[in-house]
């Protein structure tokens, strides 16, 4: 593994950072104050991102994306992560790569319009009674003739209010296992406007203002068999194949925010004077900065290693869980210490620190809680010993 950036990677990082600072930073405070992301602004940013070659950059070149390898994509995600989440996720969209699992017809209907910026997708797994335990989901689909009838509720579904369709995971049967019955899960495409499919406003979230969540309700929602994504009863298989890197994406965006917070703390420690000297010369502050920089570097290395191994085909679940766990918990620490160094000013809206601090909290929950990541890591290291 080489630690220096290639010229192409450096160019992508610099281009993305310039775009973030010029096109996203100026709109952050308004979104933080209003909690609303104006769709006219989204369209404006979207057009600029497409022209800059930054839109749908996670997708392979053969389907119209930038064709970035995983490590370079994570560097790109780190730069986007510096900005308000709603701005970069919606304005510089990265369609879910699970769309690549679709049939030729499904790609024409869903994948390519998302890459062109004509549609948005959303993923619906979580339910009020099934968070980390996805096998406990109660939403179902039953076969009726050649169709499937969906019933149930999903919640915490990100950006479902603007999505044109949802990829919905529901139980389609059961199978016997040594541990008892286990639900079979299938993924379905569900277009907005399909009878029996309702999108309701979700909850107010203190993290990521402007980035909405919604409740999805299915009441005898009829779908053709052609709406199945992947194979019947193989929903988890298609999810595990195509969604594994989302933990690395979360890790990478956390790196960007942590780096921004640390930079603010460094500049303030060098400029602010108390008792006749820069506060950065006081051990109580300088040691905080040293710890912040060390934790950030450790999280960077774990994330870049996992991305590099992903491209080599040698990445493990533990590699990705370690990166996600370290980066999300590091961000919480760095954001908190950056505010502490700034004192009261750190909590004021004039600086991005209070936003980064609030936004950091959700990262240890979504895409697998810290507890789930620790379970994955411990299971993998104990397995060779029979544990």
Image (cartoon, rainbow, N blue to C red):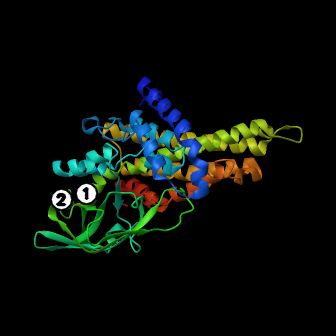
Q: Position of residue 88 (x, y in %)?
A: 48, 46
Residue 32 visible? The answer is yes
Give how far apart the Cα atoms at labels 2 and 1 are.
9 Å
| Quadrant housing the C terminus | bottom left
Q: Are marks 2 and 1 in contact (CB under 8 Å)?
A: yes
| Quarter of image, res 130 | bottom left
Q: Within the image, what quadrant is residue 229 found in?
A: bottom left
For disc 2, the marked residue is 231
- Disc 2 is placed on an element classified as loop
Q: Which disc, if any, is residue 237?
A: 1
Residue at horizontal 57 percent and vertical 49 percent from the top:
330
Counting from the top left corner in percent of width and height, residue 276 is at 89, 38
| Secondary structure under the numbered disc 1 in the rendered image | helix
**Residue 326 visible in the current orientation:** no
- Is residue 271 rendered to the left or right of residue 298? right
Q: Nearer the viewer, mark 2 or mark 1?
A: 2
**In this orientation, which residue lies closer to the viewer: 285 or 75?**
75
Q: Residues within 10 Å of mark 2 (few under 14, many from 20)?
A: some
Where residue 326 sits in the image (x, y, percent)?
52, 49
- Pinpoint residue 197: horizontal percent, then vertical percent: 30, 70
* Left-right relation of 84 to 197: right
* Quarter of the N terminus within the rendering: top left
Rendered view: 272 above or below 180: above
Instruction: Name the outermost residue toward the right.
Output: 276
């Amino acid at each position: 593994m080489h630690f220096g950036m290639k010229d192409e990677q450096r160019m992508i990082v610099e281009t993305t950072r310039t775009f973030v600072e010029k096109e996203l930073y100026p709109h952050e405070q308004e979104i933080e104050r209003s909690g609303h992301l104006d769709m006219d602004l989204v369209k404006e940013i979207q057009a600029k991102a497409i022209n800059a070659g930054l839109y749908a950059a996670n997708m392979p070149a053969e389907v119209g994306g930038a064709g970035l390898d995983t490590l370079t994509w994570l560097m790109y995600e780190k730069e986007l992560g510096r900005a308000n989440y709603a701005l970069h996720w919606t304005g510089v969209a990265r369609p879910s790569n699970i769309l690549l699992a679709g049939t030729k017809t499904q790609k024409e209907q869903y994948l390519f319009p998302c890459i062109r910026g004509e549609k948005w997708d959303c993923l619906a797994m979580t339910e009020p009674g099934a968070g980390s335990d996805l096998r406990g989901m109660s939403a179902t689909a039953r076969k009726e003739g050649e169709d499937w009838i969906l019933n149930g509720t999903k919640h915490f579904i990100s950006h479902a209010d603007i999505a044109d369709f949802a990829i919905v995971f529901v139980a389609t049967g059961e199978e016997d296992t040594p541990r008892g019955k286990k639900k079979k899960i299938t993924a379905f495409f569900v277009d907005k406007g399909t009878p029996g499919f309702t999108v309701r406003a979700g909850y107010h979230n203190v993290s990521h203002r402007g980035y909405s969540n919604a409740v999805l309700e299915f009441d005898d929602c009829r779908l053709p068999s052609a709406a199945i994504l992947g194979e019947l009863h193989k929903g988890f298989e298609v999810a595990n194949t195509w969604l594994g890197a989302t933990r690395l994406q979360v890790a990478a965006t956390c790196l960007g925010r942590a780096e921004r917070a640390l930079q603010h703390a460094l500049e303030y420690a060098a400029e602010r004077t108390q008792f006749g000297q820069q506060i950065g010369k006081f051990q109580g502050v300088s040691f905080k900065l040293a710890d912040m920089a060390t934790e950030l570097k450790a999280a960077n290395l774990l994330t870049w290693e996992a991305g590099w191994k992903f491209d080599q085909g040698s990445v493990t679940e533990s590699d990705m869980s370690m990166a996600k766990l370290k980066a999300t918990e590091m961000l919480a620490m760095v954001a908190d210490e950056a505010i502490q160094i700034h004192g009261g000013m750190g909590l004021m809206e004039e600086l991005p620190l209070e936003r980064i601090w609030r936004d950091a909290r959700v990262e240890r929950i979504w895409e697998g809680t810290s507890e789930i990541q620790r379970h994955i890591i411990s299971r993998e290291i104990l397995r060779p010993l029979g544990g």
